[in-house]
Amino acid sequence: MGRQPKSDADRVHDRIAVLRADRGVSRRELAEAVGVHPQTIGYVERGEYSPSLALALRIARFFGLPVEAIFSLDPLPSLSQELLRRTP
C-alpha cells in the first residue's frame, strides 16, 4: 500500500477532507468505497501516510476528479484562492 513520509519533501498533500465535506461523505464511506480501513483515510488526510498509486487513483475515481486535483507533492492552495484566481 503506501508508506509513512520520511521528510516534508516526501509528504503528499491532499484535498480529501475538503472533498469529503463538500460531498457529505464520511471517512468510513470513502474507506469502504476504495477498499481500505477508515483509519487509513485519516492518516492520508493528516499527511501521516502517503497513499499508494492504486489507492490515490481509486480515491480520484470515487470523486470523479483527476488525481492531480486531489494530490500534490507541493502544498495545495485553498480552493477559495483557486476560485478567486479564476474569476475575471
Image (cartoon, rainbow, N blue to C red):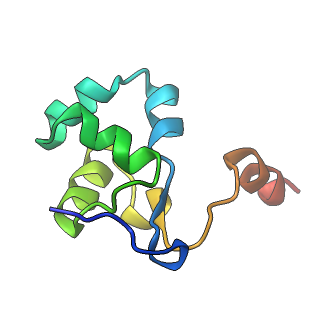
Which residue is farthest right?
88
Residue 3, by quadrant, is bottom left
Q: How many marks?
A: 0
Q: In front here: 87 or 18?
A: 18
Image point (58%, 72%), residue name:
74
**Quadrant for the N terminus in the image:** bottom left
Q: Position of residue 66 (x, y in %)?
A: 39, 61
Q: Is residue 6 left or right of residue 54?
A: right
Instruction: Establish if 41 lies above or below 82.
Output: above
**Residue displayed at 35% across by 45% down:** 43
The residue lying furthest to the left in this view is 35
In x, y percent, where is residue 79?
Answer: 67, 48
Which residue is depicted at the point 26% across and 35% down? 39
On the image, the x and y values in percent for residue 16 come to 44, 44
Q: Is residue 80 above or below residue 30?
A: below
The C terminus sits in image quarter: bottom right
Classify 80 as above or below 37.
below
| Residue at 22 percent of width and 63 percent of height | 2
Q: In the rendered image, which quarter is residue 76 located in?
A: bottom right
35 to the left or right of 69:
left
Q: Position of residue 80 (x, y in %)?
A: 75, 45
Name the residue at the front extreme. 6
